[in-house]
Amino acid sequence: MATFVGAVKRYLSGEAEQRRSIRSILLGPPGAGKGTQAINLKENFGICHLSTGDMLRAIAKEDSPLGKKVANTLSSGELVTDSLVIEIIEANLQSEACKLGFMLDGFPRNLVQAEKLDEYLVGQDEPLNNVVEFKVKDDILVERISGRMIHQSSGRTYHEVFAPPKVEMTDDVTGEPLMKRPDDNPTVLSRRLDIYHEQTAPLISFYEKKGILRSVDAMQSPEKVFEDISVHFKQ
Ligand code: ADP
Ligand code: ADP
């Protein structure tokens, strides 16, 4: 029924033939390399990259009660409310940039978010068709996160050892300064990893049961990880 309603809605809005072909999630723990791969995937496949972490960091910079609340939550490593991230994702999925397809990064992070997302996408007659699991051991994540630097406005990431910028603490593309994320410290990271294992990892079997889970060894070089993921985006 929801599928039929979604098809009718698309027909009425003149988009009858345009079901987006790539409807994906990048699923993995903090520091697994999701953001790094998303930049290449976006370029190669012309789909949008919706990172709830990037969007929440932008909200956290706003001088408003919501901005302050989000900033506090991010620095503690806890999750923000499900309703906030669901609202942000649904609004962004309708943007022009997502016309050909989308990859969600950092969302969903628990079963409630996953179920809400399913409900929304099935209602649009566009169920998810590709969930890529980034498999990385915890000790490697600690190494990656402790050396991470970001260019805040673009979301580009660098690493002190594995992916250094050409000029120290400077974005290669814009020449603007890079920063360390305040939550990329050992105490908050340990909390984020616990939350990942408790709340997000159960999504692996959730999507496996739906037959859309593809797992990649994300401990390889970024180039090799990209090669392995691309296979799933081409299907
Ligand atoms: P990482 O890239 O290290 O996995 P993110 O940038 O995705 O981290 O997220 C940073 C923080 O933003 C999280 O620790 C959490 O506080 C918040 N956050 C991001 N996505 C979600 C979400 N889907 N639900 C709730 N909180 C989120
Ligand atoms: P996520 O978005 O999953 O939190 P990032 O893409 O920000 O992860 O990557 C975390 C850190 O690890 C960054 O500093 C990035 O440069 C580095 N990194 C990403 N992929 C790899 C890889 N395959 N090998 C080594 N370092 C990597």
Image (cartoon, rainbow, N blue to C red):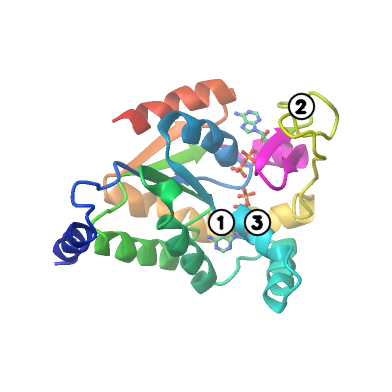
Going by the numbered disc 2, the residue's amino acid type is Pro
Residue placed under numbered mark 2 in the picture: 164
- Mark 3 vs mark 1: which is more N-terminal? 1
Q: Position of residue 121 (x, y in %)?
A: 31, 59
Q: Is mark 1 within 8 Å of ligand 1?
A: yes
Name the outermost residue toward the right. 168
Q: Which of 61 and 127 is in front in this view?
A: 61
Residue at 76% over, 71% down: 63
Does the rendering let one see residue 139?
no
Q: Is mark 3 within 8 Å of ligand 1?
A: yes
Disc 2 to disc 1, C-alpha distance: 25 Å
Q: Position of residue 82 (x, y in %)?
A: 51, 70
- Mark 3 vs mark 2: which is more N-terminal? 2
Badge 3 vs badge 1, beta-carbon distance below 8 Å: no
Residue placed under numbered mark 3 in the picture: 192
Does the rendering let one see residue 184?
yes
**Which contiguous range is marked in magenta?**
136-158
Which mark is on residue 219?
Answer: none
64 is higher (above) or lower (below) than 235: below
Disc 3 to disc 2, C-alpha distance: 24 Å
Q: Nearer the viewer, residue 28 or 149?
A: 149
Name the mark nearer the viewer: 3 or 2: 2
Residue at 67% over, 75% down: 66
Disc 3 to disc 1, C-alpha distance: 15 Å
Going by the numbered disc 3, the residue's amino acid type is Arg
Regarding mark 1 in the picture, which secondary structure is present there?
A: helix
Instruction: Characterize the local packing of mark 3: few (<14), some (14-19) or many (20 or more) Cα atoms within 10 angstroms.
Output: many
Going by the numbered disc 1, the residue's amino acid type is Thr
Q: Nearer the viewer, residue 81 or 215?
A: 81
Residue placed under numbered mark 1 in the picture: 52
Query: Which quarter shows the C terminus?
Result: top left
Q: Position of residue 45 (x, y in %)?
A: 41, 32
